[in-house]
Amino acid sequence: MSKIAYYLQEHLVGEVTDNLEVRRYFSTDGSILQMVPTTVAYPKNEDDVRKTARFSWQLAERGKILPLTARGGGSNTSGAAIGGGIMLIFPAHMNQVLAFDPKQQTVTLEPGISYQNLQQMLQSHGWFLPPCPPSLAYSTLGGGVASNYLGQKSLKYGATGHYVKQLRVVLSNGEVIEVGPLNKRQLSHKMGLTNFEGQIYRQLDKLIEESSEILAAAAKQVKSPRSVSGYNLHDIKDRGSFNLAPLLVGSQGSLGIITEATLSIAPYPEPAELVLISLDDINELKEILPKILDLRPSVFDFINKAAMDTVTSINLSQLAGVLARPEAAIHLFIEFDDFKEADQKKAVKKLGKIVDKAGAWAEVFDPENDHDKFWKIRQSVSTILTGTKGQSRAVPVAEDISVPLEKFVDFLSRAEEVYSELDLNAAAWGQAGDGMVRMRPMLNLAELGDRQKLFNIAGKLYAAVIEMGGSITASAGDGRVRAPYIQKQYGEDFYNLMLKVKKIFDPYGLLNPGVKTASLKDVKSLLRDEYKSSHYEHLAGS
């Protein structure tokens, strides 16, 4: 055992190891990148996290940089759950519900709890956390908050950040702070503190005041419904309050390590009305998309024909007898979960009129009997994620983008052109109501030509997204994979502002370095030579 691992094991309650096999196991996440940590620690409690951060800080003061990376289930596709220093694995011990208050409609959690365990507990009491990712069996709440995940119902209920009430966070120097909305008196008190927390509040408040024009310009850059790119500096000051939580949500552990989160929850609605719409011409979606959104569905997803064809090519029998219109250009999946059944029926009736007028085809699924059939079709794209074509596999690249709704169909057409130029199948799926598109080309990362295709796709699709006023990152966070494109997204001024924020919170660059700031050269140097499904991937791109 190395001196560092030995020292940490002496001082932490949780386990510490530098075993090569363990370090290799945690060298990959759901992304295309790989980094082998020097040490792996399984913190037992917040004090373990605090001690580890303090140890890293003290080393940095003596000129030795030992980075820290917080990790949940490792399903993240942006390369934010890997690191070259100390890896903190939260699901092992810090995975509990600490408080459940149905009167206040809140739940307080440790970061390592899985979405699946949380939702099972909440639903047994008639509640749920709406922004829940499809990879709920492996994804953790800490990762969800750190990346500001969308969920299957985020169209109606919003992203994770909407539900964060309060956070406990370990700073880069080992101090523990609680963040939430502060009034003027409370902010004044925080700014008067002589510790690192007080320094952060003073410097950040000054920076925001001096950067109002840069923030206003950056806000105009992205017109899509969903974006978690960059640092969220826009919502820190809101209606007279000052709140660091919106900044830490989506920062992917680069500003602080979340050790506890209090989230608001919602009453669990069931059953729901489910409708599948099939369009023979994708351009028909331009007209009916806004009309469907006016009905306020809880889910409005899509899968294009290329994706359905790919599923069938991998598993010929998977959709046999299930999909009524396999030749349709695009399939739309609509859910209405209003608490009054009459409201659901009314929405379905209005939807039927929209579909009939467009000359499209629709099937209403009985929530009692056909629920599984509906979701079997929707989740069939998981076959793409685990399927193979020779040595090629579905690789996550430019697969978490969002565009303005009026540009949605145009972007799908542009993406098809890019894929066609590279002789690839333009399989696409995602959340049409949020303008979010996911695509994973079949590539063999051991082949130089396919690696070149990967960066070709990323460059062209991100350029198209930015040109259309969209976001390069809709849900999974920038991570290292999308960090090289942030400056193109927002411009040099906002990017430099991000670097200043990072410096305020993390002057030695200890917390997940490279997340939000990696260069294209960095990404290429970390690229795996093989991409394969692992323990953390389950419906991860659905």
Image (cartoon, helix red, strand yellow):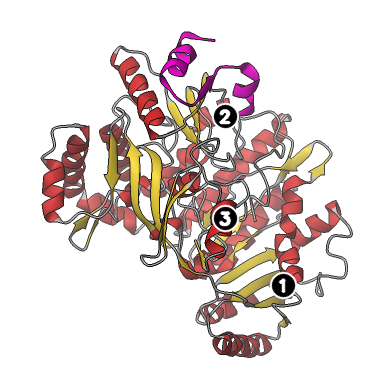
Is residue 487 something one can see in this rendering?
no
> Which callout, 2 or 1, points at the residue further toward the start of the chain?
1
| Quarter of the image where the N terminus is located | top right
Splitting the image into 4 quarters, where does residue 8 fall?
A: top left
> Which callout, 2 or 3, points at the residue further toward the start of the chain?
3
In the foreground, 170 or 412: 170
Splitting the image into 4 quarters, where does residue 60 fall?
A: top left
- Secondary structure under tag 3 reads loop
The residue under the point 61% across, 32% down is 28
Query: Label 3 is placed on what type of residue?
Result: Pro
Label 1 crowd bin: few (<14), some (14–19), many (20+), radius 10 Å: some
* Horizontal side, residue 189 vs residue 223: left or right: left
- Secondary structure under tag 2 reads helix
- Secondary structure under tag 1 reads helix
**How far is disc 2 from disc 1 in space, using C-alphas?**
43 Å
Q: Which residues are magenta?
A: 1-26
Indicate which disc residue 524 carries: 2
Query: Label 2 is placed on what type of residue?
Result: Lys
**How far is disc 2 from disc 3 in space, using C-alphas?**
28 Å
The residue under the point 48% across, 12% down is 6
Locate residue 22, reporting x and y percent.
62, 23
Whether 238 is drawn above or below 260: the answer is below
Label 3 crowd bin: few (<14), some (14–19), many (20+), radius 10 Å: many
Whether 463 is drawn above or below 448: the answer is below
- The residue to which callout 3 is attached is 133
* Nearer mark to the viewer, of 2 and 1: 1
| Quarter of the image where the C terminus is located | bottom right
* Horizontal side, residue 502 vs residue 25: left or right: left
Query: Label 1 is placed on what type of residue?
Result: His
Q: Is residue 14 magenta?
A: yes
- The residue to which callout 1 is attached is 371
